[in-house]
Amino acid sequence: MPTVPDWVKQLKPAGPQGSELLEQERAKSKVNTSALSTFLHTKAGLERKHKILAILQQEKVFDKSQNYFAGRVDRFETALARAKKLRQLYVKHGWTNDDKQCANELISEPGPYGLHESMFLITLQGQGNAEQHKRFLEPAQEYKYIGCYAQTELGHGSNVRGLETTATWNPEDKTFTIHSPTLTSSKWWIGSLGRTANFAVVMAQLYLGGKPYGPHPFVVQIRDLKTHQPLENIAIGDIGPKFGYNTMDNGYLLFNKVKVPHISMLARFSSIDPKTSKYIRPSSPSLIYGTLTWVRSTIVLQSGGVLARGVTIATRYCSVRRQFQDRDDQSKESGENQVINYTMVQIRLLPLLATCFALHFTGRGMMALYEANQRKLAADSGKAAAQASNRGAGPEETASSSDLLADLHATSCGLKSLASYTAVEGLEMCRRACGGHGYSNFSGIGTWFADYLPTATWEGDNYMLTQQVARYLLKSARSVLKGVDPTNDTQSILSNFLARQDQGAAFDVLSKDEDIVEAFAWRSSFLTFEALKHRDEQKRSWNSLLVDFYRLSRAHSQYMVVKNFYETLQSPAISSELDPPTLDVMHKLFRLYALHTLEQEASEFYTSSAVTVRQIQLARTSSVMKLLEEIRPHAIRLVDSWDFPDWQLDSSLGRSDGKVYEDMFYRASELNPLNNITVDPYPDSPVLFREKEAQKAKL
Amino acid sequence: MPTVPDWVKQLKPAGPQGSELLEQERAKSKVNTSALSTFLHTKAGLERKHKILAILQQEKVFDKSQNYFAGRVDRFETALARAKKLRQLYVKHGWTNDDKQCANELISEPGPYGLHESMFLITLQGQGNAEQHKRFLEPAQEYKYIGCYAQTELGHGSNVRGLETTATWNPEDKTFTIHSPTLTSSKWWIGSLGRTANFAVVMAQLYLGGKPYGPHPFVVQIRDLKTHQPLENIAIGDIGPKFGYNTMDNGYLLFNKVKVPHISMLARFSSIDPKTSKYIRPSSPSLIYGTLTWVRSTIVLQSGGVLARGVTIATRYCSVRRQFQDRDDQSKESGENQVINYTMVQIRLLPLLATCFALHFTGRGMMALYEANQRKLAADSGKAAAQASNRGAGPEETASSSDLLADLHATSCGLKSLASYTAVEGLEMCRRACGGHGYSNFSGIGTWFADYLPTATWEGDNYMLTQQVARYLLKSARSVLKGVDPTNDTQSILSNFLARQDQGAAFDVLSKDEDIVEAFAWRSSFLTFEALKHRDEQKRSWNSLLVDFYRLSRAHSQYMVVKNFYETLQSPAISSELDPPTLDVMHKLFRLYALHTLEQEASEFYTSSAVTVRQIQLARTSSVMKLLEEIRPHAIRLVDSWDFPDWQLDSSLGRSDGKVYEDMFYRASELNPLNNITVDPYPDSPVLFREKEAQKAKL
């Protein structure tokens, strides 16, 4: 590695030092960082993190110092080594899945076992029968089979019904023929497939007696277990570099009429009777429905922390960075101003800081609802089964919990879309708030942003999902219009709107928190009935309403975020865990999130008459600006409470000790491999790198 | 490279083929692509592009096929080879600077000579005297000296006055001592410095007799011309990987009391008399001011084309990609729908398509204004010089053209900020509109976006710049309030607003184009006088108004874009070059840009009473949706008119022949180096890549 002269090593940043500035910041706020950390992550969660962190830091393979420099092939190699080590640690320390998840978050890079450990095992577990568990799941749990989940195709993303890969039942020898009839039927984007997996769950259109039965999952061996070469008539490869996620080998996969045995079709919900060649229909599709809802709820829960990483980095750097003097204070003594003192920086960062909490609490609310619903579903199933055995009835008996699941499903769709885009856009805003240095990989934001981006597309494209929210809201509105009694919150707010719409709204959003929540509910309800009018009365085409649906989903999801934040602040838990000064700041963060959102979406709030033009003006020019000023002194302690270890952030700008410039310089000068080469700069010289020339000369 | 089985090579995408779909698109519109191309780029511009393209494609070094795969060091090596070859071609073919610029745009990657060929030569030329031209500029033009422009420091970006590097005059030996007193004084981000340059223009605080004279430029040799090693007491290196721009060696630079001769200080505008050691003040700072304005105008002009690349790719791919059936048309025959038929896709892409034209025409308007002003300035200077020689007066005589320059300066600041962010955000929107495949590097959008991003920071941070616009608008408003007669458009619209504000506005934005322009002028004027009231009457602090200033700058800049687009459509040039059907579509694009922007910024338009709530609702639900439908059939021909060669786009998704899937597959399977490795996937095996293991075994 390049050497740095001694006179350079002795230089310090111009004062005041970053470490002094951050200490001052921490001294001037009474926010109880540790209590807030515990409230956010639980005591057990924090202890786990520090335990796992200590283990990872001892292993050389997890050293991050070359992460930002290495090219694709090298990064993949390191990621594979890390994945193996992680599995060894899991076995050695007897980790739980929570421990492993925690380790993955600390390492913060997708790894080649990623899809094996998630979708492959989950699908085998959830959709395989006992025989298949023994045949496939057990070796997979021992990493003898390493799998992936092959659904998306080159020509088919969101629309699963449009998949082209076929699985044709051959009654004569009790096999299926898996086939890729076209180039667009090539499986594509499949994580862990490109170089790593030797098995795949393949989603294919089932054909039986010449008739299509829709997409079904098949377990297929794709590579030789010894040579790791693709099996005959199977083509596999990595799909190439991406904007991020380059430690993962997303792959493609094609079949040329490959025969697999009867046991390959995962048979817990639907199957083929090998004797009669008859199709046995799925018994309870709502359970699968439930898995997707759970995955989306997880995305909502994680989005707060994802964004908090960027906000932590930007807030710390903007407290260390000083630039220009305040225009109204040009005295020589004051020196340059901390960037975070400028309102233009505050308006970009502090609402995002509030958003981290808002999303986190919303995700928690979602998870609690999901778990409550699962319990109810299990109870109902028991009842239904009992009734069914008495009356010979089918799965429609579970209607009541299915209805709740529909609400949860729609909520998870809308919130997944809102939360992941909010995190994506917020991270880019944080990167920009770091000025020029935000562009350096050492900021730690750009690569994190790039790796997170696909979350907006997977588990339901963020735009597509909003149609499901709209469909559900329209259905709820129709039911409310018919006079059906509300059975959930969505129906309640719609019903409340109907009852009050002739009196009009008079929400005191600037003084009363509960009125803020009501104003968000009002706007969402207004947009729902507007959309219903367009569709049911004016008979407008579905396609012509997609833009309205997108707005509607966004409005409804924002209502849910505001509501969840509000309810968290009302909960006994928060009052018992946080002291009054800390609680007071949390309360201000709620108001900042809500009023800033209200002001950003002003036009819909006016149009629905939820608030007046004057209220919006006041929210912007007075309330929001005042809240920025009040929250500003607590910014560092608030980001500290997210408790990201420096090792996890891997950011020069976001260092908790404020040694921003020292770290930038160290990484650039001492870790940077480009500084090992000497170029020949003259256009007429054919020599590029002199070291290479010298090597050639030696040979 | 990996081999692909024959049965895979014979596969075709499911029909209809992309090529057929794009042909259908082209057949259904009467937009005259070739006439529109000529109007956008001029005949000479198009001819130049095709001439240069043919030359570049013949040279192996410009082959792009490994660009998306290579790591940092390899990419830099290739970029250096390309820079050298480009210089050789320039000499060989006797290229003009326009030819070279065209070649750079086709190659579309920053190169290691980038800053030598721009800022280094421009600064020597513009700020050096005749002696310095001979001593520095001439060898630089022959690439004996290869330079960079070292202004930004690790701790100092936007605030040039805060720079820490010092240049102290030593009267005893007529030298300057260049010194870096702290770590934060390290030059940082300097393009072409990290590995390539052997000279630098260094901006340093001049000290003379212990007194500071502010930042001045010094020409300093930094590396040995033979060994290319840093000279004694100089530390240099590359600053490491960035989010993009990785073919450029942005560098750092520190000096440990390095002495340079008197001739090093660029002396055209200010200098030190070596005999008396007296400082000679700058004669005409407005000329330097002019260069920055020119650079920003260029950014505005380019932003349209920058965005058009993304729009071209996304529009073509969304015409080839089909997904889901239309919900209101579920007949079996219709098959999957082209994605571009969905209104949710149209609302994301078509306003951006309109924006490309809007920004391009605005950039052109700016350039024309700049050139007219330069001519006026030259004429005035002549007059002033004549007068000065009569009366012994100084540079303040050029006041009238300086006033115009101030207007142009403010305009360029606001538009640079708006245009570059519009392009940045629009490119990300285009990437998303491509769904999952937008995330692949083969989309051609992600890397282009990442390379373009710093434009938002350099030549004035986009947020900082808005303060200059606000300052100028406040000054103009004060002058209008005093009753001074308007001398430019800004003063005219402010004055018009004052005259009419008591009557109120009644702009018929939904029917009359000129009323749209007036509504934008009204909103900008309203916000100007609001801001003035806050500052001058309510005496609010500058810092508390920064958010208002940002909005004001944005509003004023949007007004200018709308006005420029409108005026281009009124110009005799466009009517003579475009036939009525093409002109009609251009007119629709104007309305789409303007009404969509008006709707996005609805809240400011209401508040200023420029339009009513009802008008905004109609603009959204009726006018904009109708325009999308009307423009949709012309989308492909409109993007074709930007005339990007496929070689330039380097995108699977944006191929002009629609062979999207074939190209994706080819790049992934046949160009991808990761597919050359075979992993050992089992966690307990220490082997990662089997090829490496096999090599080790051989040794």
Image (cartoon, coloured by chain):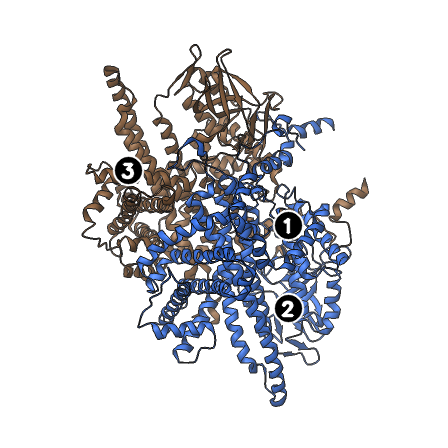
Chain colours: A brown, B blue
The residue under label 2 is B217
Q: CA distance from mark 3 to mark 1?
A: 54 Å
Mark 3 lies on residue = A475
Q: Give, as a three-letter code, the residue at label 1.
A: Thr
Q: Which residue is mark 1?
A: B247
Marks 3 and 2 sit apart, C-alpha to C-alpha, by 69 Å
Q: Determine whether the residue tagged by mark 1 lies in a helix, strand or loop.
A: loop
Q: Residue at x 43, y 13 (%)?
A: A277
Compared across the picture, whether B671 is left or right of B301 comes to right
B128 is higher (above) or lower (below) than A131: below
Dot 2 alpha-carbon crowd within 10 angstroms: few under 14, some 14 to 19, many 20 or more: many
The amino acid type found where label 2 is placed reads: Pro
Point out residue B145 in the picture as x, y percentages from the top left corner: 73, 61
How far across and down, in percent of the image, does residue A487 sit?
Answer: 22, 36
Q: Quadrant of the N terminus of chain B?
A: top right
Q: Specify the quadrant of the image occupied by residue B176.
A: bottom right
Which x, y percent locates residue A98? 42, 32
Q: Nearer the viewer, residue B302 or A693?
A: B302
